[in-house]
Each structure stands twice: as C-alpha cells, then as structure tokens.
Image (cartoon, grey):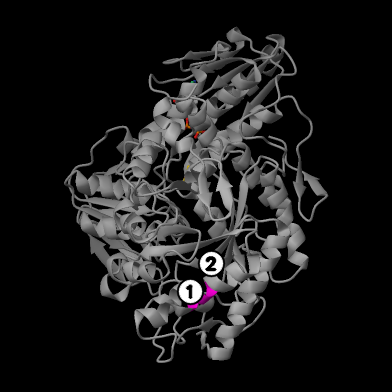
Amino acid sequence: MRDPRYDVLFEPVKIGPVMAKNRFYQVPHATGTGSSMPHTRAGIRESKAEGGWAVVCTGYCSIHPSSDDRHYPFSSLWHDDDIKAQAVMVDAVHRHDVLAGVELWHGGGVVANKVTREAPISPSGIGDPVWVTHPIQPRVMDLADIRELLSWQREAALRARTAGFDIVYVYAGMGYLPFQFLTSRYNKRTDSYGGSMENRTRLLREMIEVTRDAVGDDCAVAVRLTAEENMGVRGFRGDVEGEAVLEMVGDLPDLWDVKLGFTDDGVTSRFTQEAYQEEHIRYVKHKTGKPVVGVGRFTSPDTMLRQIREGVLDLVGAARPSIADPFLPKKIEEGRLDEIRECIGCNVCVASYGEGVPIRCTQNPTIGEEWRRGWHTETIAPKSSDDSVLVVGAGPAGLECARALGQRGYAVTLAEATRELGGRVMCESKLPGLSAWARVRDWRLGRLETMSNVEIFRESRLTARDVMDLAPDRVVLATGARWLPSLPDSADGNPPPVAQSLQVLTPDDIMAGIAPQGAVLVVDLDPYYIGGVIAEKLARDGLPVCLVTPSVAVSPWTAYTEEQHRIMVRLLEVGVDVVTSHNFVAAGSDGAVVESIYNAAARTVPCDALIIVSTRKPVDALHHELEQYADEVVAAGIRGIDIIGDARAPGAIVHAVASGHRFARELDSNDRSIRMEPAGVSFSSVAL
Ligand code: ADP
Ligand code: SF4
C-alpha cells in the first residue's frame, strides 16, 4: 500500500478537455527511433504507460520537410501517410488508459535539412553558433513564410488528432523556431513579428491559436517553453522575457511544459543535483492559471511532493527517470519505494540519440528492447530448469546477471573476491561527481537481498578448483577488466621510453588509493570520462596536474552525453593544464615530452608521476584455468562456462549491465533473434 503522504501525487489533473489520471507526466524525449522504427518506439512508450505515467509523449515530431534534423532520429507528421506510424504508439499508450501527447516541432534555423535539402528558415537569418555544425545559414522568413508555417502547424495538428493524440504541442524551446522569434538573439525583425516583446510573442500566440483551431475540444494544447537560458542579457531570461510572454499568453494553452535551454536542460549528475531546474522555472506558476509540468531528474517522491505543495509544478515531469524506471509511478503508488530503479544521471540515453541509434540506458537494459527482443521491463520468464548457476564477480555485469537469474527463480551463487560489492561502480562512484553511479549497485543489491534463492559470498576469490568443488550446472564469469599501464608504440615501433625513476600508475591504482607524488601527467588515450575525472581528483588532492591527449578535446565521447564542455570548465577551475592534440613521446627525470599530432612540435611538461589511461584487459585468468581442466570441469557436472561484461569486452557500465541482463534472459533459450524494422525483418544476434 502506498504511503498516504503521496496521495497528492495520484490526484487527477485536468488539462483542457482531457484528464490526466495522476500527476506523473512523461515529457517529450528522444528515443533514437525516429519515424522509421514505429514499433520500437511504441514499445518504449507503452512500457511507461503500463508503468503508471498518466501522460506519455512522443519525442520531437517535425511538422514539415523544412524541419529535417537528419542524421538525428526524429519523427514526423509531414503528410497523411505518417499518421499510421504515429498511431502505433498512440494505440499502445491508450491500451493502458493513458493520455498520448505529441511534440509538434519546427527547428527553424538550427536544422540543416540535410535530406530534404530545403533552405532552413528563421526570423532573421541567424542560426545557432553553438549548435549548428553545418555550413549553411538559414534564410529570413517573410510574412508569406510565416503564414505557411502556421498552416503546417495546423495541418500537423489535424494529423495528430487523426492519429488519436490527446495533447498536441507547440514547441517554443531549445532554440527552435517559435523560440527564435521570442528571443532577441535570433529575432532582429522590424515588422510586426520583431522588436517589442508583444511582437516577438505574436508567432507563438498564432501557433497556439491555429493548433487550438485544428484540434477543437478533442485534444489539449500544450506549449513547451524554455523558461530560462542562463545566458544573461544575450539569452531568454525568465524574469524578463519569460514573465512577459506568460503575461500575454499564459492562459492561452491548456498546459505549460517548461524546461531550460540547450546547454542546461539534461545536465548529468556529475554537474547537477535532482530538482536543479526549480529555481529557474518557479516563476511560471505565478503567471498562469493553467497546469505546469517541469522536470528535474526526479526520483524521490518527497522532492516531487514538495514541488507540488510549494506550487512549483502541478505535474511531475520526467524523461530520464522514466527511462531508468518506466514503472516509477506504479512503485510509488504501490508503496514499493525500495524497488525504484533510480536514474544515475549519466546521459548514456542522451548519447544514443546523438549517435542516431535506439536508446540505451545504464540502469534499464530493457529500454528499446521491448519490441525488438520482446523484453518486458519488470517481468521475465520463469526458469525452465532446476539448473544452479554460479556467477563469479559482483560488478555491474555479475550483479545484474545474478539479479535477473534470481528473478527467474534459478538457484544462484554469487561469489565476489572483495568485501564490497559493485566492482568498478564502487570504485568509480568515489571519484568527484560520480556518487550517484553507486545506484547501479544499490538497486541490484537491494533486489538480491530479497531473494532467498540467491546466495552471496563476499571475500571469496574463486580458483578453478573452487569452481569445480562448487560444481554448479552453469558458470558465468563476470570478473571484469583492469587498466593496463602500457602505451601504444611510437612511430619507431617501440613503446615511448619512460625513466625507471618515475612512478607509473593506472586509474585502478588511483581508485585503489595509491597516491602519486609530485607533478602528475595524465596520458589520456580513452575517449570517455575516466582520464578527465582522474585528473580532476588529483588536482583536488592538491597535486599539479597536466592532462595530455591526442584528441582535439578532453574526454571527447562525452560530447554525446553533453558533458564535454562542462568537463573542460571543471578541469580549468581546478587548475589542470589540459594539452590536447598532443602525443606523449617520452618521460625522463627532467619532465615529459609531448608532441603536436599535426607538426610534431615538441614541448616539455613537468612529470614526476605518469597516470596512463589507455586500454583495459579482461580479467580472464580463471577462464583460462578452467579451460585447462576441461575434463574435470565436465566430470564435476558443469555444463557451460560463459563470460559476460567487461571480462568479455571492456566497455562502459551500460554494456556490462546489458551483458549480464541478456545472459540471464537467454540462459535457456536458443532464440537470439532480434526483430528489425521495417516490421517483420529479423536476424539472429551473436550468441553470448
Ligand atoms: P563488470 O563491469 O564486467 O561487472 P567489474 O570489474 O566491475 O566488471 O567487476 C568484476 C568483479 O569481479 C570485481 O568486483 C572483482 O573483484 C571480481 N572478481 C574478479 N575475479 C574474481 C574471482 N576469481 N573470484 C571472485 N570475484 C572475482
Ligand atoms: Fe538515467 Fe543514465 Fe539511464 Fe539516462 S542512461 S536514464 S541518465 S541512468
């Protein structure tokens, strides 16, 4: 039973002509599926509808070919043929008595129309200098273009209504077209759509009106607004432009969905806390009588409740928390708070969109697999035999594997060499800003502790002999990987020379508490976060730190998680000397030599200790040992030995969790096929 304190979260909320059955609202978010994967998309959305969200929205849905964001995956309602694909999602959501919302969108000057090859349009010919990575400027819209835009919105809204949507959006956020009209940075017009705030709001007003006119009383009309850009006078300020807009059109739509701008919206837990948007959006409710939904990576029902009680929000919006746990509302409703799989704020989900592929999530390995592999986020087929399974290693792969096998009813033994469970997650979550990552361990351990069919043995480093003595039916090795202190060969075919007197360490050494002495050089050859965060830690420990990388930016892959810029700012703040586009060449008693990747121009940097962030090697000694005893293994009754997670292929935590989960799903199944869209195509995936 739920705690009566949370009753308020389950009150219905009227949104114009429709009624949300509770206050949980899955705001529009990308799924990396676009229009070409309607079933994959519907599977993702349906899992949220089933999980208790009262409203489930699409991602951004283009209204016209002049808003073509490819290579990014977006959906569209350009013509009547698109209705069918959208209806797949609407029907899936409606099966659970849940409202479906569609975020109609025109990107204006920040899209490049790479496939449709239309000239991008904008209020004044200004694209976005930060985000536009294509060499074309948008053209200036004249009054006929504005009339056309309004007709596109109207037609798309009509199609949305035909598809069955209950809430239809006007999207005035994130640098997209109606927002460009609102913002003086983009809008330099001197006609009735530019200049005064009233003129700049004219387009938004008209878009709301045509949308309302199109959908009548069948659907609610929502506006999604970037309520604050945090850019000072250059940007859209809540207390200036925001309040003025709401004073003019605050009561025109049926709902306000508010958020921050491009650079501030989906910030990771490394840089923000839960509810980080609150101070910026608080003003909105004071300026409208209509319901307001907002986000803040909410996973705590107490924070949600406080925001409702304090009049910050009427509806609890979520993108990432609904991805990490589609059943979050249901778990609160049923008083199962300790079962909530909390988002860790890593933005791997965001990265999938940036890479143009279906969404992945570190915490939720089933997201995106609902239709493709038929995986339900909460349920899993019961065991098909009485096999016992030994899982060796309790990092994210081993924990997830043991948990999912335990859920299936298998008798599981989980053995871990160390006292603390969690493997790499426990080490990495102690690094600056990464404490929320411990949730990967905490949720799984919490679930395992409720399972009487799972036994956990700590401080149990297993040998091949131990494994054979335990004699399980199946063995799963989740023994992880270790960072190597080795550097790639230089141009002469030899490893770069490093003086014996220097301390040479790896990220594992630093995380194990080994302290370097003197000036530290971090040689970062890894694309993701670890080099940057190790440099930050050592600088915070008071050491002089230089980070050298051959990449053009530090931690380059974090551009996908929208962290790269913040990481650089953070490193500069703590005093790290960041040297990009340079190779490490040698280190001696008088420092290290690094060379430009372009012209080999050399410079010397201070170096008493070298931290090499290079590659990881699977911990597979136990596997090789077991291979040597193949006959004895068979004699012990062991029918299968498999390797998962980093021990199989060193990757990010998301890969380890997914690997553990998949093994547990497929332990007793020969069907490893994946359905691919267009619908009906399937192929067999590689067996683990
Ligand atoms: P992954 O990311 O694949 O889960 P981790 O490196 O996070 O990998 O975790 C691997 C875990 O396996 C570590 O906690 C490590 O202590 C444990 N481990 C490695 N070898 C053994 C072994 N022989 N017996 C028990 N535990 C082991
Ligand atoms: Fe949260 Fe990371 Fe999952 Fe995204 S990928 S929902 S940020 S846990």
Q: Nearer the viewer, residue 395 or 444?
A: 444
Q: Residue at x 45, y 66 (%)?
A: 174
Q: Position of residue 70 (x, y in %)?
A: 61, 69
Is the stretch drawn in magenta largely helix, strand or loop?
helix
Vertical arrangement, residue 295 with respect to residue 121, above or below: above
Q: Secondary structure at mark 2?
A: strand
Report the residue that reaches farthest toward the right: 680
Tell which circle, 1 or 2, labels the residue nearer the N-terminal end: 2
Which amino acid, mark 2? Answer: Val
Location of mark 2 (residue): 170
Asked if residue 224 is among those painted magenta in the image, a careful observer would answer no
Q: Determine the CA span between mark 1 and mark 2.
A: 8 Å
Span of residues in magenta: 203-207
Mark 1–mark 2 CB contact (< 8 Å): yes
Residue 98, position as x, y percentages in the image: 62, 44
Horizontal and vertical percent for residue 356?
A: 60, 60
Residue 650 or residue 36, whichever sits in front: 36
The secondary structure type at the circle numbered 1 is: helix
Image quadrant where one finds the C terminus: top right
Residue at (73%, 61%) from the top-left corner? 162
Asked if the residue at label 2 sits under 8 Å from ligand 2, the reply is: no
- Asked whether residue 131 appears in the rendered view, the answer is yes
Q: Which residue is mark 1?
A: 204
Question: Against 354, is 674 above or below?
Answer: above
**Vertical comparison of 135 with 581: above or below:** below
Q: Does residue 204 belong to the magenta stretch?
A: yes
